[in-house]
Image (cartoon, rainbow, N blue to C red):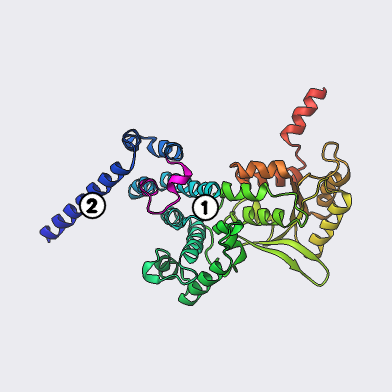
């Protein structure tokens, strides 16, 4: 038994030595030396995009991509998963930028898979499952809809570890590839492909620790945001659907019709809510107005009627130019407050400037809380308070 333990220890030491040797060979000397510092992960996440340009990492066999992956795995092996996440996410974003620069699709499954693994070790089951599904979309494109289980890092994680059946795995693989366009468009983002699939894979409830953890892909969100203003309004709906889907436990149905109403988005919240979202109820409705002008009183009143008809206490009006009367609390802005006072229905309004903040890193859940409380408690925003003081 002692020999067996000694042999296992020796094998582990040899593996670590081999790992560090490969990592040192793939990174510049000054960057490799920084890895052992206390802020090594921060330095890596900041410096790697500067050292390795998008066009250098786009090929999966490139030393640059492998070195970047190893840097993330270094912290992953040390169980420093939050730090590893920052490195894997930066690699994924660089690959997306590489696609845009070279007009060439890049295989992005590796950083997505490791991101899912990190979330699993952190006890974030919803995030973990989502990133594994994003990785599946990438594998589906690479293998043209028929992912070989023996060659897939996702197969045993999703089928053995997350309860996705073999049949469902094959179905998602085929469906994901069918949505891919080789000519290059939104389908080069796995997030877009995943939005077009069904949501039957969403079987996990968020853990309390991940309930307020919000992470969105800024490259994809920016792509959608920059496309606002097109005539159909679909781009705003896609953006809103994606941003809401990044909120753990939120399930979204887009463009649903009833016998009397067309719903832009209907959302349901799965799991046990432990914060302000417990007041939403299980279902809430979102309305999207990608207009050149603000939404008016009639729009607000009609949206209130829709919420009332489905007995929902909460709704979000996404309006690119906000609502009328926002500065003077008249028009639609006044109706927003009266709706709560009269019926107990909270409608919050999110405009383009606030969407811009989310795209650049603002926690969307925190934004929802602030907007919700401003209506629920009739609390003036800080901007309003500051302007009032200036008038005095």
Question: Image height check: is 31 above or below 73?
Answer: above
Give the side of residue 289 with respect to residue 9, left or right. right
Q: Quadrant of the N terminus?
A: bottom left
Q: Which residue is found at the position 66% from the left and 57% from the top?
A: 241
Q: Which residue appears at 47% of the width and 46% of the height? A: 55
Looking at the picture, tell me which residue is in the foreground, 366 or 192. Answer: 192
Q: Is residue 364 visible?
A: yes
Please say if the residues under marks 2 and 1 sit with CB atoms less than 8 Å apart.
no
User: Residue 298, percent across and down?
Assistant: 89, 53
Mark nearer the viewer, 2 or 1: 2
Figure quadrant of the C terminus: top right
Bounds of the magenta segment:
52-67
Answer above or below: position of 52 versus 99.
above
User: On residue 15, which mark appears?
Assistant: 2
- Earlier in the chain: of badge 2 and badge 1, it is 2
Place residue 270 in its image quadrant: bottom right
Nearer to us in this view, 233 or 317: 233
Residue at left offset 18%, top offset 57%: 8
Residue 45 appears at what percent x and percent y?
Answer: 44, 40
Graded by Cα atoms within 10 Å as few (under 14), some (14 to 19) or many (20 or more), the crowding at tag 1 reads some
What residue sits right under mark 1 in the picture?
210
């Amino acid at each position: 038994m002692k020999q067996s333990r000694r042999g296992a220890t020796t094998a582990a030491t040899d593996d670590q030595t081999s790992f560090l040797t490969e990592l040192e060979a793939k990174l510049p000397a000054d960057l490799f030396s920084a890895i052992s510092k206390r802020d090594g992960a921060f330095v890596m996440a900041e410096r790697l995009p500067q050292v390795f340009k998008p066009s250098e990492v786009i090929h999966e066999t490139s030393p640059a991509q492998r070195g970047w992956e190893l840097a993330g795995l270094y912290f992953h092996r040390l169980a420093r998963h939050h730090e590893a996440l920052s490195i894997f996410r930066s690699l994924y974003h660089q690959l997306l930028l590489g696609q845009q620069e070279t007009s060439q699709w890049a295989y992005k499954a590796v950083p997505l898979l490791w991101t899912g693994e990190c979330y699993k070790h952190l006890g974030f089951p919803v995030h973990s499952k989502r990133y594994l599904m994003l990785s599946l979309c990438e594998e589906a494109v690479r293998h043209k809809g028929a992912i070989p289980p023996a060659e897939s890092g996702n197969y045993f994680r999703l089928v053995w570890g997350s309860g996705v059946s073999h049949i469902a795995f094959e179905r998602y693989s085929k469906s994901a590839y069918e949505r891919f366009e080789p000519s290059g468009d939104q389908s080069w983002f796995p997030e877009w492909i995943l939005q077009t699939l069904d949501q039957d894979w969403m079987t996990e409830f968020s853990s309390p620790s991940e309930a307020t953890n919000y992470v969105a892909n800024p490259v994809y969100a920016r792509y959608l945001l920059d496309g606002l203003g097109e005539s159909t309004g679909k781009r705003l709906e896609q953006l809103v659907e994606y941003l809401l889907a990044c909120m753990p436990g939120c399930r979204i149905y887009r463009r649903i019709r009833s016998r009397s109403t067309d719903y832009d988005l209907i959302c349901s919240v799965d799991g046990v809510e432990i914060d302000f979202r417990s007041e939403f109820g299980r279902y809430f409705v979102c309305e999207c107005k990608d207009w050149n002008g603000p939404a008016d009183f009639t729009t607000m009143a009609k949206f209130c009627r829709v919420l009332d008809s489905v007995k929902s206490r909460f709704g979000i009006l996404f309006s690119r130019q906000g609502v009328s009367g926002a500065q003077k609390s008249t028009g639609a802005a006044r109706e927003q407050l009266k709706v709560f006072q009269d019926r107990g229905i909270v409608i919050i309004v999110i405009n383009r400037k606030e969407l811009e903040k989310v795209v650049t890193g603002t926690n969307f859940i925190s934004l929802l809380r602030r907007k919700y409380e401003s209506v629920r408690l009739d609390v003036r925003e800080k901007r309003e308070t500051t302007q009032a003081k200036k008038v005095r």
